[in-house]
Image (tube, coloured by chain):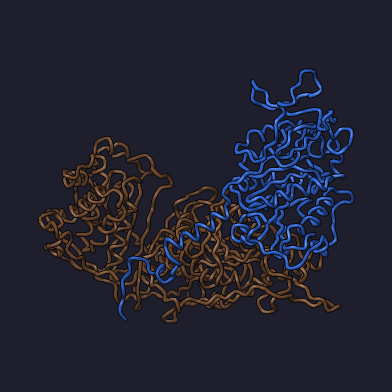
Amino acid sequence: MTSQVSSPTTPEDPSSVAGVLGEQRKPAKETRRLDRVIIRFAGDSGDGMQLTGDRFTSETASFGNDLSTLPNFPAEIRAPAGTLPGVSSFQLHFADHDILTPGDAPNVLVAMNPAALKANLGDLPRGAEIIVNTDEFTKRAMQKVGYSANPLEDGSLEAYAVHPVPLTTLTLEALKDSGLARKDAERAKNMFALGLLSWMYHRPTDGTETFLRKKFAKKPEIAEANVAAYRAGWNFGETTEDFAVSYEVQPATSAFPAGTYRNISGNLALAYGLITAGQQTGLPLFLGSYPITPASDILHELSRHKNFGVRTFQAEDEIAAIGAALGAAFGGSLAVTTTSGPGVALKSETIGLAVSLELPLLVVDIQRGGPSTGLPTKTEQADLLQAMYGRNGEAPVPIVAPATPAECFTAALEAARIATVYRTPVFLLSDGYLANGSEPWRIPELDELPDLPVHFATVPNHTADDGSEAFWPYLRDPETLARPWAVPGTPGLEHRIGGIEKQDGTGNISYDPANHDFMVRTRQAKIDGIEVPDVVVDDPEGQARTLVLGWGSTYGPITAAVRRIRREGGHVAQAHLRHLNPFPKNLGEVLRGYDRVLVPEMNLGQLAHLLRAKYLVDARSYTQVTGLPFKAEQLAQAIVKESADV
Amino acid sequence: MSEALALVPKAEAKQSMKDFKSDQEVRWCPGCGDYAVLAAVQSFMPELELARENVVFVSGIGCSSRFPYYMNTYGMHSIHGRAPAIATGLAASRRDLSVWVVTGDGDALSIGGNHLIHALRRNVNLKILLFNNRIYGLTKGQYSPTSEVGKITKSTPMGSLDAPFNPVSLALGAEATFVARTIDSDRKHLQGVLRAAAAHPGTALVEIYQNCNIFNDGAFDALKERDTAQDALIHLEHGQPIRFGAPAPDGLGSKGVVRNAATGDLEVLDLAAEGADASRVLVHDAHAASPTTAFALSRLADADTLHRTPIGVLRDVIRPVYDTDMAEQLDQAVVQQGQGDLAKLLAGNDTWTVAG
């Protein structure tokens, strides 16, 4: 547990800025209480905005607020400096109550340069606070993004509360005795900004200082410079008259059930879910992967946990990545491949082989904007039909989809359950927003985790007429229709499997027409028969005539929109799918219980298409493919509009 | 037994060829060279004394890739070109298995070329048997990436245009640690090469010239017929001078492979010629650290006529084995980080508690 108030720092040097900071830990100025705040840090790709956002998030999480984040950055590692395409931002929404999204519009924008101001201004509501680094507002920098006059001086920002701060100058001044070269000292300006914001919102500071000292442990002078810049930012807020007020956002204690919490991003939760699935199944975890945005973090994370017996294999391509995973699955590993849409396209043939071999295999698709290379760093959920149908022949594959970053953990366990019980490849569809976004997560106790026992075949399962014993690799469990998993090394069960159609039972090659018809239908029946929980409808008053149905990462915005409508007296029901193949058994009945079914999706209506085809209901789409998540207000308006004639 | 098979359990009882025959009817065309290779492998396997259940054959797509169905071991007939990748995952996660890949010239060198070269450079404990018949058989007779230029086939009625791969040269260029070539009809030679491959720790590539009597009959006749073979085949044996051709008075071949001092390349010296110096003939060193000479040997063959084709083990060197090192990293991680503790992992370093 982290204490919620920092202790005074560096007592050995009470005269330093740190001493001042320590003594005046409680800001002396007027404090106002807020229930929630949305902050956006924006700067050049090289300005360290993601790090700044991460740190503010950690401070906020340890303070006990509920939170939701939205990192947004270009695909280029260092896009041209000072340009609009080069702007990288990090938005954080935190509150004293339960919240669901990173927020529609920032209350505070930190703009490190003219490009960051210009790129983000359109998202700000009137009255929002803007903290700008005036040092970067040179004529040339402004011209680069098309400002003919200085927006800080020409009155164009009148609607906002602008705080002009010479961040670079102040940082350099604070570090003048550090001995660092100007260029190195300047790079600490993001920590100055973080310090200032930490003062404004009463964030605990010790976590960031510890973090900086650890991150730069090999370069202590850089570590100390960053800490000094951070403290200077805090003190600047405390002393300068431009910042008259600071804000308190109380911990969201009542929003959370009792327990121990941490902040977690979707990709980290997913990686932990996979490791946990390995432990719960008792199988060694094998990951075959090829680097691809936004899935690579899972490969990075799993490669750090070899002490759990995790094997990570960076393959020569996407096809080899899933091939190696399938080979490991044949050998009895819990096999996983992680990728994004373009990688799924390359893996399709091997997924089809896994369908035919009926071996457990997890295919994790962190969806991004498409088609083709599309928008690598932006979010979308347009791979649903690819996961559902993107293979030759009748090749059904179960699909699970987490709704929030933390839910990526349970989704991994659920995918592993389905894969191992039903001996099938399983798609796990996350997306860029879930992958990089984060939220508080109640850390589960080990005894709360599901048991996922796996039983390999050990003895022959067929007795021939002459009494001889044999192993039939395609003799199915009558309930699950799963075939036995007999791993190499098991004496007496030697068998051959392949992608050619197999005879029911024996698994021998068969081109028999009736057998093929039977096998195609049986593979489909196996997937259709997978036990999944019923979909739960949230309709508190029971008066709603419109159902809003979502899947995946739209959960946050949809729930926030539904809450808004209800606050204003409207009635709308909400349901969210975590299983997209097979659908929950009660889904048809749920859909038919409402006069209008509205399906918001970050694609052109893929789930709606599936629902219409399967249930013959007039499911209506509300779609957006901007590479960004829905905004709650916009979604609320759309729901109201779509429900108006019901 | 070599390090390559040290972790594979041994058979409890003596085995015979029959133990490795599955109950499936073999469905290659009558007269296909694949029958000879299958028989050679089935009669060779008992020699390794491995528990049959710890042997796995993985194949891709093509005539030769039906091979696993006929072996009474574990097996997977996978998809076109991907067998080395699939076998890599299996071998890397199960060091107690002896994993064999069966592939063809189209499967390994065309659609699966990427996986082949990466398996070779990675040096996973795999034995790859590449059946090279210089034609696409299963799709009924299109030219392959080892077909000679100008090959007239159904897809190239005016002759093929692209230069062929020499699989041995390719493997040597891909950092392979074991590269050998043999011929379907010479069972003794084939089994000798298999023996060396099985003993090799890491990836072994064995190219097997294999006759397709339907679509490319006689492709290797120059290497098989008595009157041409002695001039066409260069038998390589480690530690022996590289000589071939009609026997000289000393009983060895009357031609020798020598290094051209000016270019550094290899060439053939007629030892019967006046003034020819037999001491210049190279002694084959399969264990040479540099692949240079092995590569030069592989280039002696005429791509068209196959004259001067070296067979035998061209290269057999020791380099760290991928799956061994992977397992060592897992052990090291436990030493450095301790046995994985799930509760600790999930909790991380920054937590807070909400009281009930």
Q: Position of residue A567 (x, y in %)?
A: 34, 74
Q: Report the front residue among A146 and B337.
A: B337
Q: Report the front residue among A490 and A516.
A: A490
Check the image and report above or below for A463 versus A397.
below
Q: Quadrant of residue B71?
A: bottom right
Q: Quadrant of residue B117?
A: top right
Can residue A329 be seen from the camera position used here? yes
Whether residue B130 sits left or right of residue B261 in the image: it is right
Colour of chain B in the rendered structure image: blue
Q: Position of residue A411 (x, y in %)?
A: 50, 68
Check the image and report above or below for A593 versus A262.
below
Q: Report the front residue among B116 and A149.
A: B116
Q: Position of residue A398 (x, y in %)?
A: 60, 67
Q: Report the front residue among B210 and B85.
A: B210
Q: Quadrant of residue A442?
A: bottom left
> Which of the image's four quarters has the N terminus of chain A?
bottom left
Residue at 33% in and 75% down? A255
Number of numbered markers? 0
Q: Position of residue A591 (x, y in %)?
A: 54, 74
Residue at 66% in and 70% down? A485
Check the image and report above or below for B234 versus A116.
above
User: Which chain is rendered brown in the image?
Assistant: A
Residue at 48% in and 54% down? A296
Residue at 31% in and 66% down? A61
Q: Which residue is at the far front?
A: B250
Q: Which residue is at the far left?
A: A15
Can residue A597 be seen from the camera position used here? no
